[in-house]
Amino acid sequence: MQGPLIDTLARQGVSRRTFLKYCATLASMMALPPAAGRAMAEAMAAARRPSVIWLPFQECTGCTESFTRSHSPTLEGMIFDMISLDYQETLMAAAGHQAEEARHTAMRDNAGKYLLIVDGSIPLGVDGAYSCIGGRSNVDLLQEAAAGAAAVIAVGTCAAYGGIPKANPNPTGAVSVSDIVKDKPIVNIPGCPPIPVVMTGVLAHYLTFGSLPELDDKGRPKAFFGETIHDRCYRRPFYDQGKFAKTFDDEGARRGWCLFELGCKGPVTYNACATVKWNGGTSWPVESGHGCLGCSEPDFWDAGGFYKALSVPADPLGFTAAAAMVGAGAGVAGGFANRAKKSTAKKTHEPVTLDDLEVPK
Amino acid sequence: MNELQLLTWARGPGLDIAVGIFVLGVLWRLIEIYTLGRKKDLAAPRRAAGASGLHTVFRRSLAPPGMLKRSPVSYIGGYTFHIGLAIIVFLGAPHILLISNLTGLSWPALPAQLIDLVAVVTMAAMLVMLFDRITKPAKRFLSTFEDWFTWTVTFLPVLTGWLAVQHLLLPYTTMLALHILSAEILLIVLPFTKLFHAFTLFGSRWYNGSANARKGVPV
């Protein structure tokens, strides 16, 4: 694709007005000042088009699906027009040696300047043999590609935190990008899959300001991961009123009451689903009647079960019966010991006589 | 360990250990206390009207004449925070859910805002009582480490729970984990400190009441 982004968009039927509106929305979503929308539009329209290398590791391609199939093929999909995507196995036409060649060329020609996008976790077990591309392990490829990258964007919970491959007992020894890459700026865009607009927002921010957006302590853009699902949920008033769905098809569920008791992880999940929604603002998991799984949090897979409320035990109690037996046993033993002590005291008791009380002269 | 892992630990192994120690301690102490027995009273019983174990259980909950005026903080503050704790623990929705999960028993909850208000009032009452304990020379003289310690372990679950709900100080996930951990500390400590009065209170009142009844003294 050649020429500025705005021309490409125009060819795809996106008017300048629509583009400006989109940039303004993006800027406001990221809590940037109003002028940033225009700056963003100008920067993106001019499109310096940084080289981007996208490495897929131990993943399910769901993240790529999420971006490529996001609502209107021209707006969220714009991320692929904003950048020069020089290597993306799923989307590129080339395969085999040609694909590897494209990656090497991009890395050589844009050394120190390209963006590295990673989806999927990196297995370290058996010297990384669990996932290899072109005969090389993921960890090897990542270290090579990260060395010349300006920044790394870890897309999806697998790349950001290890995700499902890292779930207990983690058979492949999966780790996150930030466990391997220590000397480059890393943006985590977790989610299973992540919200496409977050990716667009981060790229737009990078194109406009030449820097990465402000991140939280887990490396996520604060603009999208600053608040919990629960706090922004339209069902929140029902939580406050104590109105809960008890099963997925009871009266409460039909009335759209809070899904806390059905295991919703909204209170501990930081993500933008409740405000941005999915499929072009059509709906999102809680709106469709299912609790939040907490997919943008590290180790969400091992957080005590998707259908268990946050305030109930994560595991069945295992010690209680044994503890009750030990406690009762200790009580009975204590009782016998006390009785024995009492009877000994009784036996050795010597009545006090008047003589004992007399003060010796 | 990140905060979600801490929360999952608190909800999993942490809760298991805490409930285990709690059940162990409660059974141990109750059985030991009730098997102690007392010497047989050989005197002829002298029953008086209104004197019995049951009467005493209720009568001891009321302030004796004049006492409310002499130490209003102890009575009003004590009532307020005990009732407040009971409301929070037994009528807060997440707490009922926990009880229902552990025992199968369930009942309707109070609205979250009301529980929130009760938590604030409870904490205020507890702080006033602590201040009173510090400033009144007699109370301070009678206070031991156990008194300060049990006040703290009782106060912390209320404070952390309220902070978690209000999103203050720390992220909700961390605060919720701390809340559950503080409640677990309370569970572990309860059977082995004066907090065990939650279990022995009515039994000992009954015992004193019935002993006094035999002596013909309605107390």
Image (tube, rainbow, N blue to C red):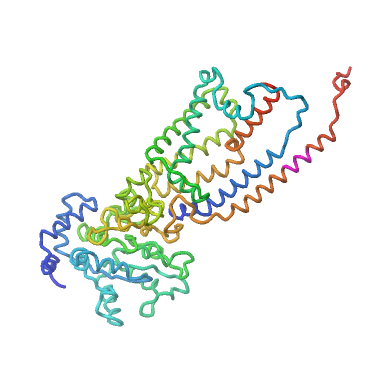
Residue at x 62%, y 40% (from the top left corner): B192
Q: Is residue A52 visible?
A: yes
Left or right of residue B70, residue A341 in this image: right
Instruction: Give the image quarter of residue A96.
Output: bottom left
Provide residue B71's location: percent of width, then percent of height.
52, 21
Left or right of residue B73, residue A213 in this image: left
Residue sitting nearer the eye, B190 or B139: B190
Q: Does the magenta stretch include residue A336?
A: yes
Provide residue B94's location: percent of width, then percent of height.
44, 46
Q: Is residue B189 magenta?
A: no
Provide residue A105's location: percent of width, then percent of height.
26, 76
Q: Please tell me whether residue A163 is drawn above or below residue A313 in the rendered image.
A: below
Q: Please tell me whether residue A196 is drawn above or below residue B10 in the rendered image.
A: below
Left or right of residue A6, residue A270 in this image: right
Instruction: Give the image quarter of residue A145.
Output: bottom left
Residue sitting nearer the eye, A146 or B191: B191
Q: Give the range drawn in magenta.
A: A335-341
Is the magenta region chiefly helix, strand or loop?
A: helix
Residue sitting nearer the eye, B42 or A126: B42
